[in-house]
Every structure is written in C-alpha cells, then in structure tokens.
Image: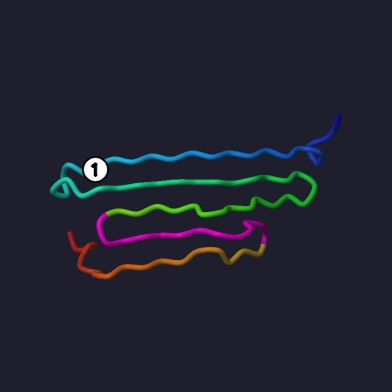
Amino acid sequence: MGKTFADVVAHRDASVNGKYPQRAGHPTGESIHGTYSGGTRNSHLSRAFSGHHKVMLTMDGVVSRRSSLTEFQSNNLMNWKQ
C-alpha cells in the first residue's frame, strides 16, 4: 500500500439530468467520468460533457499543466443572448 500522495489513484463517475425552468423547460445534462493519478499528477476525463438545449461542451482527454481537451458546439449562438 502506498504511503505518499504520488501513490493515489482515484476514479469517479457522476451524471446529472434535469430541466431549466427559466428556459421553457429545456433539458440539461452533465456527466463526468474521470481518473486522477498522483504519480503523474494528471486527471484523465473520458466522455465528460455538459449540455443544454442546443449547446454542448465535451471533454475527453488529459488535464495536466498542459491540456487541450474541450470541444464546444452550438447550433445557435443566440442561446447565449440574455
């Protein structure tokens, strides 16, 4: 058994689904599937997303000091108009 933080490996899966009442009941969903490795000090996200109506943020890759893991898609940028 490890004795330092470098030996830690943690995994988490979580999902949330609902509706935005102030946005005419549009559905929303969030999901995260990730693993943290203390030895490399990296978090690996797989099929993690946050989205509602016509907007989706997808994360799939490694989070570290140098990361590139997001994809943002909107079929209608007017969704962000207040």
Determine the residue positioned at 80% across, 47% down.
39
Image coordinates for residue 44, horizontal then vertical, percent: 63, 53
Indicate left or right for 19 with 16 as reference: left
Indicate left or right for 73 with 48 as reference: left
The answer to which of 29 and 80 lies nearer the viewer is 29
Q: Quadrant of the C terminus?
A: bottom left
Instruction: Name above or below for residue 60 compared with residue 11.
Output: below
Determine the residue positioned at 81% across, 39% down.
7
Q: Main secondary structure of the magenta part?
A: strand
Determine the residue positioned at 13% across, 48% down.
24
Q: SS at mark 1?
A: strand
Indicate left or right for 3 with 9 as reference: right
- Estimate how packed mark 1 is, as few (under 14), some (14 to 19) or many (20 or more) residues with alpha carbons within 10 Å: some
Determine the residue positioned at 75% across, 44% down.
38
Q: Label 1, on which residue?
A: 19
Image coordinates for residue 64, horizontal then vertical, percent: 66, 57
Image coordinates for residue 16, horizontal then vertical, percent: 38, 39
Indicate left or right for 17 with 69 as reference: left
Q: Quadrant of the N terminus?
A: top right
Q: How many marks?
A: 1
Q: Residue furthest left?
A: 24
Q: Is residue 71 magenta?
A: no
**Amino acid beneath label 1:** Lys
Image coordinates for residue 10, horizontal then vertical, percent: 67, 38
Q: Which residues are magenta?
A: 53-65
